[in-house]
Amino acid sequence: MSLLIRHARVLTLAPPKADATLPPGAVRARRGAALKDLGVIPRGDVLVADGRIAAVGAELPVPADAEVIEADGRVVMPGFVDCHTHACWAGDRLDDWEKLLSGVAPAEIAQRGGGPQATVRAVREATRKQLAAALRGRLDLMLRGGTTTVEVKSGLGLTLEAETKMLFAIQRAAQEWSGTLVPTALLGAAVEGDEAAFTRMVVREMLPAVWHEFPGITVEAACGADAWPAEACVRLLERAARHGLPIRVSADRTAATGMVPEALRLHARSVDHLEAASKADLLALAATDTFAVFTPAASLHAGGRTARAGAFADSGGLLALASDFGPAMPAQSMPLVIALAVRGSGLTPAEAITATTVNAAVLLGLSDRGTIEPGRRADLILLRHRDERLLAYELGGNPVDLVIAGGQRVGAA
């Protein structure tokens, strides 16, 4: 059976003409002026068959077996791709948050047994089945809001047993979910005990064990005063890259770390957060094929500065937006991410939409989605809006009327 969405405002995100430099079927991330080009068909149809987009155009013929969905001018666009989350966890941080609101310092919360270590303990105590079930519930919530592809990190276990348990739980949830999960081994997340001994153990023992169990997995390190020092991050990522693994870095969240030049030297896929990055580092990053991933909802929740995503886009950089959804960041809504990026980071609505669809998909190495073109995976959302700028204008609520994942109608808001 096929699906035909009729009379929609279609945001194809497709380039105006074919790129002869790309392999057949490949998609290129947008940068510069192309970030603002949503490839709009003001009134068009989208035909879905066998999990793929079969045709896009005006007044397409209706197949005999098709389920027809009348859009009546509402926006149809690619499903959101959330390329940076910590959505696999156990326990909660509500008590910590309440203490922070009352003025208790994070260091004191940690001394009382709270903070990140409380989450680490909860993850270690949870079973793989429990972690997978909790993750699956969060994924279903994200799917109802239009997110059809989600990157999920480990990093909350800090032992080989707990880290692999998280990655197996992510695999299990992926098998049971209608959307797509992309796992990341965040091995350089935090330090337990002696810093030198711990980071050496991760590089020499944990990393090889993980790549043997999960071939080809992306490896990430977080650089900062509350994470790993730059030197240790470099050692971890250098070894991962030598074995052909994709690498990513989170850096410069609260202070400059010097990690951006190292990430560029190592050809990291992305540098994430960047709220405290220097202008010089952002300009250097913008001149490369390494993505910058900005997380404006996390900036709002933490009460910190907002990264200069708009200036980065104006400099021609490769840009993606993500939620950073996790135990210490309670927002999973990509429309909220878009709204905050426009208000606080200087992006236009069109740039923010591109950064949460095709660009985020390319970052994750997924060339089969993020645009509405024949042959692409049919991950689509039908909004209740007839103007896509309302994604950025509205604050709160769910703008998604219908979600299609892999060609299957999976939910309506």
Image: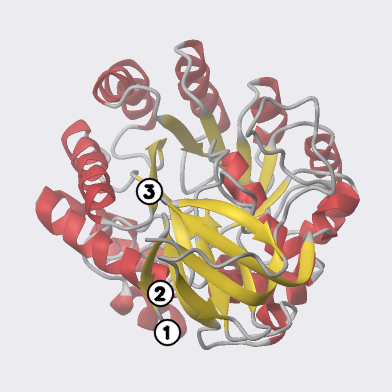
**Residue drawn at point x = 71 percent, y = 53 percent:** 276
Left or right of 75? Residue 82 is: left
How far is mark 1 from mark 2, CA to CA?
6 Å
> In the picture, which quadrant includes the N terminus?
bottom left
The foreground one among 5 and 192 is 5
The foreground one among 30 and 121 is 30
Residue 5: assigned label = none
> As shown in the figure, which amino acid type bears the numbered disc 3?
Leu
> As shown in the figure, which amino acid type bears the numbered disc 2?
Arg
Q: Earlier in the sequence, mark 3 or mark 1?
A: 3
Q: Position of residue 259 (x, y in %)?
A: 65, 34
Left or right of 327? Residue 317 is: right
How far is mark 3 from mark 1, CA to CA?
22 Å
Judging by the rendered image, the residue that carries numbered circle 3 is 181
**Label 1 Cα neighbours within 10 Å, binned few <14 / some 14-19 / many ≥20:** few
**Label 2 Cα neighbours within 10 Å, binned few <14 / some 14-19 / many ≥20:** many
Residue 413: assigned label = 1
Tally the numbered discs. 3
Q: Position of residue 234 (x, y in %)?
A: 55, 23
The foreground one among 132 and 379 is 379
Judging by the rendered image, the residue that carries numbered circle 2 is 144
Q: Position of residue 107 (x, y in %)?
A: 40, 62
> In the picture, which quadrant includes the C terminus?
bottom left
Name the secondary structure under disc 2. Answer: helix
Cβ–Cβ under 8 Å for marks 1 and 2? yes
**Residue drawn at point x = 22 percent, y = 54 percent:** 176
Q: Earlier in the sequence, mark 1 or mark 2?
A: 2
